[in-house]
Image: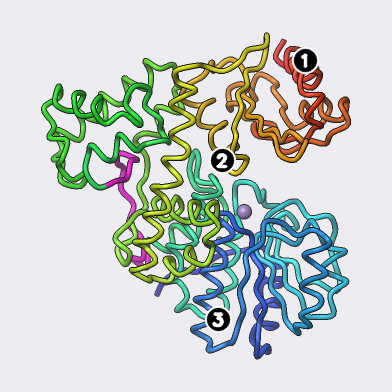
């Protein structure tokens, strides 16, 4: 007899309530977020609804502003499920003339009598680390039908895509992992946290981690591998234990040499969640979903999660394109460095859809670990700012959320987010003023 998910009574009541709505519905409208977690949540729900023989229509959106809510309202659906979003737009959801379920892990505004909210924050769980959109989608699915445990690997990809696995799975996520392993849908091994075909391809296309001097430089990788007597063309999976260890320690040394934080170097060897039915790891699936979302091919992400082989091939192609776009700018930053103020560093990111990723990777692997990093993208007379710090800097009182908010408001913009990662939008002509203000704020925080 397999175990099942244990939840506080009021949490499990909310899930049962949602399950009842789906059970009675003939047709379900599903709206989810376009990031890796949202795509995983949508794929899990699609699998569960298909198994129940329900008709459904799935759409992925970038956000849920009033315009999006109005468009949904016009469709006249009787039953709507929001995934990975909704708790922040509770007024909008209540305005819909439909039975509405919102499975969300973002901080809710308030409880609702009309909308069924399944949100860990209402039940003493931290939605930023213990549960994500995909884990809530799986939770509802397995409450509807135990057979839906076969969708658990997709949920794990969502958890990893939302970076909730960092430092070990917790809360609902951990329960899902344990029960998925028990049911043999996933196996866990410690291993080198790199994916790719050949060793050469894996290292030269690696952006996370980004190896200074190797990533994006095939000739250097070939020379590096030959120096440690590894055939560049050997498949990643075929390396025996001795060479795998050798490669791991050489790569760890390189990361230390480029000034990475110890916790970043440790990530190189981590738990690999292998999905036997798909012959790839959950972190691989998370990367593929992320690339599909960022490259505007959300449907492909869902198709590949559902086991479509052709979709997997196409998604791999998209991931290569996405990675090479990210790599291109990182290589330039490696060569030219970033612009400096006393307490922050920054660079231009021409493509705003890549700015957040480039900013985070440049911070973690290339630039000064002592200063938070900003990526600036100019779009229609405005500058979109992405910023990233490190956990270490946050432990030293860095708070980019309040920093960006205050500096942006000073120049007539808006900003906010998390202490370690935050964003802002400011008028183009007040860039310098913003940077000076933020530099001063960050200096005070870290002082
Ligand atoms: Mn999410």
Alpha carbon of mark 3 to alpha carbon of mark 1: how far?
52 Å
Rounded to the nearest angstrom, the CA distance separating label 2 from label 1 is 24 Å
**In front: label 3 or label 1:** 1
In the picture provided, is 3 more to the left or to the right than 376?
A: left
Pointer 3 or 1: first along the chain: 3
Q: Read off the residue under disc 1.
A: 436
2 or 3: mark nearer the eye = 2
Q: Which SS class for mark 2?
A: helix
The magenta region covers 182-196
Check the image and report above or below for 159 versus 41.
Answer: above
Left or right of 396 on screen, residue 191: left
Which residue has dot 3 on it?
Answer: 49
Quadrant occupied by the C terminus: top right
Crowdedness near tag 2: few (<14), some (14–19) or many (≥20) residues, C-alpha within 10 Å: many
Position of the N terminus by quadrant = bottom left
Q: Quadrant of residue 258?
A: top left
Residue, x 47% and y 24% (percent of image)?
Answer: 332
Mark 3–mark 1 CB contact (< 8 Å)? no
Helix, strand or loop for disc 3? helix
Q: Residue at x 58, y 22 (%)?
A: 392
Q: Earlier in the sequence, mark 2 or mark 3?
A: 3
- Spatial separation of the CA atoms under disc 2 and disc 3: 33 Å
In the image, residue 235 above or below residue 208: below
The residue beneath circle 2 is 354
The quadrant in which residue 135 appears is bottom right
User: Residue 421 placed where, x, y %?
Assistant: 65, 34
């Amino acid at each position: 007899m397999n175990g099942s998910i244990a939840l506080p009574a009021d949490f499990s009541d909310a899930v049962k309530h949602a399950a009842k709505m789906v059970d009675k519905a003939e047709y379900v409208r599903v709206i989810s977020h376009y990031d890796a977690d949202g795509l995983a949540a949508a794929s899990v729900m699609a699998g569960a609804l298909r198994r129940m023989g329900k008709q459904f229509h799935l759409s992925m959106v970038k956000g849920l502003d009033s315009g999006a809510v109005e468009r949904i309202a016009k469709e006249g659906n009787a039953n709507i499920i929001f995934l990975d979003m909704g708790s922040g737009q509770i007024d909008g959801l209540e305005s819909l003339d439909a039975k509405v379920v919102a499975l969300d892990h973002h901080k809710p505004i308030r409880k609702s009598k009309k909308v069924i909210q399944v949100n860990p924050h209402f039940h003493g769980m931290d939605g930023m680390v213990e549960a994500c959109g995909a884990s809530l989608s799986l939770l509802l699915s397995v409450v509807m039908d135990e057979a839906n445990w076969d969708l658990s690997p997709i949920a794990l990809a969502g958890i990893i895509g939302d970076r909730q696995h960092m430092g070990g799975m917790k809360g609902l996520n951990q329960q899902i992992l344990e029960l998925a392993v028990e049911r043999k849908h996933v196996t866990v091994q410690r291993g080198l946290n790199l994916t790719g075909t050949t060793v050469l391809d894996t290292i030269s296309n690696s952006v996370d981690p980004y190896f200074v001097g190797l990533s994006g430089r095939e000739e250097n990788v070939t020379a590096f591998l030959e120096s440690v007597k590894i055939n560049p063309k050997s498949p990643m999976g075929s390396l025996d234990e001795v060479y795998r260890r050798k490669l791991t320690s050489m790569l760890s040394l390189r990361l230390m040499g480029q000034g990475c934080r110890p916790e970043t170097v440790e990530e190189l060897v981590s738990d690999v969640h292998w999905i036997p039915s798909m012959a790839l790891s959950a972190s691989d699936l998370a990367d593929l979903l992320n690339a599909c979302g960022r490259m505007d091919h959300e449907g492909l992400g869902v198709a590949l999660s559902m086991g479509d082989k052709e979709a997997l091939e196409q998604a791999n192609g998209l991931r290569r394109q996405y990675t090479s776009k990210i790599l291109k700018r990182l290589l330039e930053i490696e060569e030219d460095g970033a612009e400096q103020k006393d307490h922050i560093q920054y660079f231009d990111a021409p493509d705003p859809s890549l700015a957040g990723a480039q900013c985070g990777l440049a911070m973690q692997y290339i630039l000064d670990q002592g200063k938070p990093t900003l990526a600036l993208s100019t779009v229609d007379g405005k500058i979109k700012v992405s910023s990233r710090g490190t956990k270490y800097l946050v432990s030293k009182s860095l708070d980019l959320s309040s920093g960006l908010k205050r500096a942006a408001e000073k120049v007539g913009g808006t900003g906010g987010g998390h202490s370690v990662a935050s964003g802002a939008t400011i008028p183009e002509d007040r860039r310098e003023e913003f940077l000076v203000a933020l530099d001063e704020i960050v200096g005070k925080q870290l002082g």
